[in-house]
Image: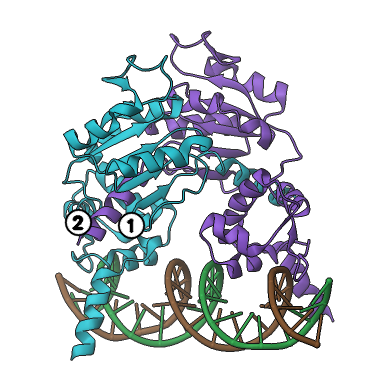
Chain colours: A purple, B cyan, C brown, D green
DNA sequence: TAGATTGTTAATCGATTAACAATC
DNA sequence: TAGATTGTTAATCGATTAACAATC
C-alpha cells in the first residue's frame, strides 16, 4: 500500500526530459489547431514523430484521451499551458542590447508566453538612454533598483561570452534566481540558480557535420 | 573475422548524438585553452560534466590521450575541427532580414566556423537594396542566380513561421540541400534535405517550468 | 458487433555511470 | 615502483518502440 502510493507520487513528479521538450512542440501545434478533437496519429504526422511516442508522452498528463475518439484539443492545451506556466506572468530583464538582445525585446511571441521584458540594460554608455521598441536602454547600475521595483526573478544574458560570467554574478547579487543564457559559455554559478543555456550558433557546425557525413 | 570487421566499421561510423552535441562544447573550450595538455578531469570541471563521460566521448575519436599525461589540446582540437568541417568553407544564404537575421549576419563567430553568408534576402520591398553589414538585401527573385553563382548549398530561414514552409520550398527548388531553420515550425520537406531546427524562444517555457517545479 | 483509437506493460535500444585493467 | 590518468567492458539507467489489452 505504502509502496504504491510512493509509486504514484513518483509518476506524478517525474517527467522525462525528452518528453518535456516535446511538450513544447505539442503546445505549439495545439495552439494553432482549430478542430475540437485530435488523434495521436495526426499530431505525429505534423511533427514527424511516431504516434506511439505521442501517446506515451501524453500519458504523463492527467487528462486522458478517449479510445476511438482522440484527444480534446482544448483540454490537452490547457494542461500543457499549465505545465509551462502560461497562466502566470513572469517579469524578466535582459542584458545586452546587441542584435540578438533587440530581436528578443521585439519578439511578439513572449506576450503569449506571459513573459514580459521589463528592462533592457547595456554596458555601453553610447547605447544608454536610447530606445529599443518600448524600452529605454539602462545602465547596469540601475539593475538593482529595477529588480526590486518589478520583483524580477529571471535574467536573460545576451552579452559576448567574455562578460557573461560577470553579468550573471551581478544579476544574482541583485536577486535573480534563474538565467536564460545566450552567451556561448558555461556559467559558474551556485547550484541554487536555475540556468538554461541556449546555444544558437553552434547548430551550424552540427549541420556541417551532417552534410559531410551524408556525402561520404 | 568478418563480424569483427563489421563491428569496427560500425564503431567508426556511429557517433552517438549526445556525444556529437558535447563535441561542440569540447571544441569551444579547447579553442580557448592555452595550455598544451589537458585532462578529462579539467574538461569536466569547465563544463560541469563527469570526467568518465568526457573520456568515453573522446574514445570515439582516433587520437588517444596518454595515461598519466592527458590529452594534447592541439591534436584533440584538430580532430574535433575536422568533424565539424572547420577546414572547409561553406557558403550560405539567409532569408529574413528581421533582427534575428541581422544578428546572424553580423555574428563574427561564423568566420571561425568557415561559414560565409553570401547573400541576405527579404520579401519586403522597402528593405530591398538597403545595407546590412557588408550585404545588400536582395529580393527573393535573385535567389536562383545567387545560389548557382556562388554554389550555395545551405539556407538559413529567419522568417515568421507563416512563410517558412514556402521559403524552404523555394530554396529547395533553387538547389539548396540543407536548411538551418529558426522559424518555430516543423517544415515538410523531402527526406533528402537535411534540416536542423533551432528553437530559440521556446526555451523560456522550459525555464518557466523549471522555476515552477522548483518552487513546489 | 467490429473497428479504431487510447493507454499500459514489456522489450529493445541508446546513453551514462561504475569498475577496473592498461600504461606511462 | 607507485600513483595518476586513460580507455574499455560491464552494469545501470532512461527513452523509445513493440505488443497488446482496454474501451468507446
Of helix, strand and loop, which one carries label 2?
helix
Q: Residue at x 73, y 48 (%)?
A: B215
Q: Quadrant of the C terminus of chain A?
A: bottom left
Choose between B127 and A169: the one closer to the eye.
B127
Q: Residue at x 52, y 37 (%)?
A: B161
Spot occupied by residue B168 in the image (x, y as percentages of width and height): 40, 42
Q: Earlier in the sequence, mark 2 or mark 1?
A: 2
Spot occupied by residue B74 in the image (x, y as percentages of width and height): 17, 51
State the residue lying farthest toward the bottom: B1
Q: Residue at x 60, y 50 (%)?
A: A24
Q: Residue at x 16, y 55 (%)?
A: B75
Residue at mark 2: B79
Q: Quadrant of residue A176?
A: top right
Is the Cβ of the residue at disc 2 closer than 8 Å to that at disc 1? no
Spot occupied by residue B6 in the image (x, y as percentages of width and height): 23, 82
Residue at mark 1: B192
Q: Is residue B51 above or below residue B150?
A: below
Whether residue A15 sits left or right of residue B63 in the image: it is right
Q: How many marks?
A: 2
Q: Are marks 2 and 1 on the same chain?
A: yes
Choose between B178 and A45: the one closer to the eye.
A45
Q: Quadrant of residue A156?
A: top right
Of helix, strand and loop, which one carries label 1?
loop
Q: Quadrant of the N terminus of chain A?
A: bottom right
Amino acid at each position: 500500500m505504502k509502496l504504491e502510493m510512493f509509486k504514484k507520487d513518483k509518476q506524478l513528479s517525474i517527467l522525462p526530459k525528452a518528453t518535456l521538450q516535446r511538450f513544447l512542440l505539442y503546445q505549439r501545434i495545439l495552439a494553432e489547431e482549430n478542430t475540437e478533437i485530435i488523434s495521436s496519429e495526426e499530431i505525429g504526422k505534423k511533427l514527424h514523430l511516431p504516434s506511439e511516442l505521442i501517446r506515451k508522452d501524453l500519458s504523463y498528463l492527467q487528462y486522458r484521451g478517449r479510445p476511438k475518439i482522440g484527444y480534446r484539443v482544448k483540454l490537452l492545451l490547457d494542461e500543457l499551458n499549465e505545465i509551462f506556466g502560461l497562466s502566470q506572468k513572469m517579469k524578466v530583464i535582459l542584458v545586452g542590447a546587441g542584435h540578438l538582445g533587440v530581436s528578443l525585446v521585439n519578439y511578439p511571441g513572449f506576450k503569449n508566453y506571459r513573459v514580459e521584458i521589463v528592462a533592457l540594460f547595456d554596458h555601453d554608455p553610447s547605447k544608454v538612454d536610447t530606445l529599443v521598441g518600448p524600452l529605454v536602454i539602462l545602465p547596469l547600475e540601475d539593475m538593482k533598483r529595477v529588480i526590486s521595483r518589478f520583483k524580477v526573478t529571471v535574467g536573460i544574458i545576451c552579452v559576448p561570452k567574455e562578460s557573461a560570467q560577470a553579468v550573471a554574478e551581478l544579476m544574482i547579487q541583485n536577486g535573480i534566481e534563474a538565467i536564460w543564457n545566450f552567451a556561448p559559455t558555461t556559467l559558474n554559478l551556485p547550484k541554487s540558480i536555475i540556468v538554461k543555456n541556449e546555444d544558437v550558433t553552434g547548430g551550424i557546425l552540427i549541420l556541417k557535420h551532417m552534410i559531410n557525413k551524408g556525402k561520404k
